[in-house]
Image (tube, rainbow, N blue to C red):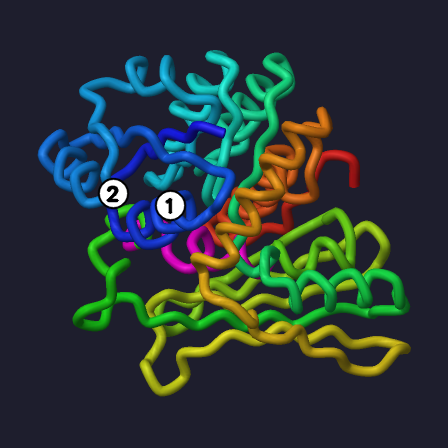
Amino acid sequence: MRFGLLGTGYWATEAHGAALLAHPEAELVAVWGRDPAKATALAERLGVRACADVDSLLSDVDAVAIALPPDIQADLAVRAAKAGRHLFLDKPLALSTADADRVVAAVSAAGVASIVFFTNRFYANVAAFLNDAAAVGDWDGARATVFGSIFQPGNPFGGSQWRREKGGLWDVGPHALSIVLPVLGPVAAVTAIDGPHDTTHVLVKHRGGAVTTMALTVDSPVMISSSEYLFYGGAGFAAAPAGDATAVQAACWAIGQLMDAVREGRPDHPCDARFGRDVVEILAAADTARQTGTIQLLPGS
């Protein structure tokens, strides 16, 4: 499958691009970026051609990998889907439910396959844990703590303007939701408050009755930078394991699953654009609750 890469930053280079080069059945053929000089430099590094415009890239590929800020990603994903190109996307899918809905509508209309690369979901040991936890059931809730320190010197994500503006809720919140939703199910209501170090504390009521608490930041003190996902209930306590591979290996597995979906004619995937859209809806509701001091009910609750 011929892929085009949209984006020239760290994650585009070190995750998406590296995985596309490493995957034995993927062929990376072109790169496009908002900065033509960076696109040319990355294309030379990866041994592919740089495209001056998106349409030129889309005309030469079967699928696109997008590693760009989420507000930019949404528009490009719609454009690529309408061109009939399969989508390897990143989280969050968008920064508003309306934009996420546009992506889902375009994907559905075109019948293309899509995967949103929630990194943790593509570690084999984490996937196995989630399958087992969902089968066990009998969970009262979960606690998710995701403390990052991306603004420390040398961190490759520290210069990301959208992360600085949107904070941990939108950056690491998708990771937390990607772990708890497969086990505890859809969300009925959400509220949130701010805490020290730009932390967002989120309280989530699932439709089945379980409750998830999430503490999220990308600006924590270095000494408490960590991630933990803990389920509890009648089955006792169960902590999700850390991933047992590199991000590039996880991306390779995700790319392989996208290609399998295309070959088998089944565009639906547990981490497709529809799931990405549901995550955005929860994040947007939490953001509104945080700003207004309210409890937000989600549609269908």
Question: In terms of depth relative to the viewer, which is nearer, 9 or 281?
Answer: 9
Mark carried by residue 11: none
Q: Quadrant of residue 153?
A: bottom left
The quarter of the image holding the C terminus is top right
Q: Quadrant of residue 32?
A: top left
Q: Is residue 72 visible?
A: no
Give coordinates of residue 266: x percent, y percent.
73, 28
Left or right of 137, for residue 50: left
Q: Amino acid at mark 2?
A: Leu
Question: In terms of depth relative to the viewer, which is nearer, 24 or 207?
Answer: 24
**Local crowd size for mark 1, using a 10 Å CA cut-off: few (<14), some (14–19), many (≥20):** some
Give coordinates of residue 198: x percent, y percent.
36, 66
Label 2 with label 1: CB-CB less than 8 Å: yes
Left or right of 291, for residue 123: right
Q: Is residue 172 magenta?
A: yes
Instruction: Give the extent of the magenta segment.
Output: 164-177
Q: Which residue is mark 2?
A: 46
Left or right of 211, for residue 103: left
Q: Is residue 29 visible?
A: yes
Q: Is residue 77 magenta?
A: no
Mark carried by residue 21: 1
Left or right of 57, for residue 117: right
Question: In terms of depth relative to the viewer, which is nearer, 27 or 194?
Answer: 27
Q: Amino acid at mark 1?
A: Leu
Main secondary structure of the magenta stretch: helix
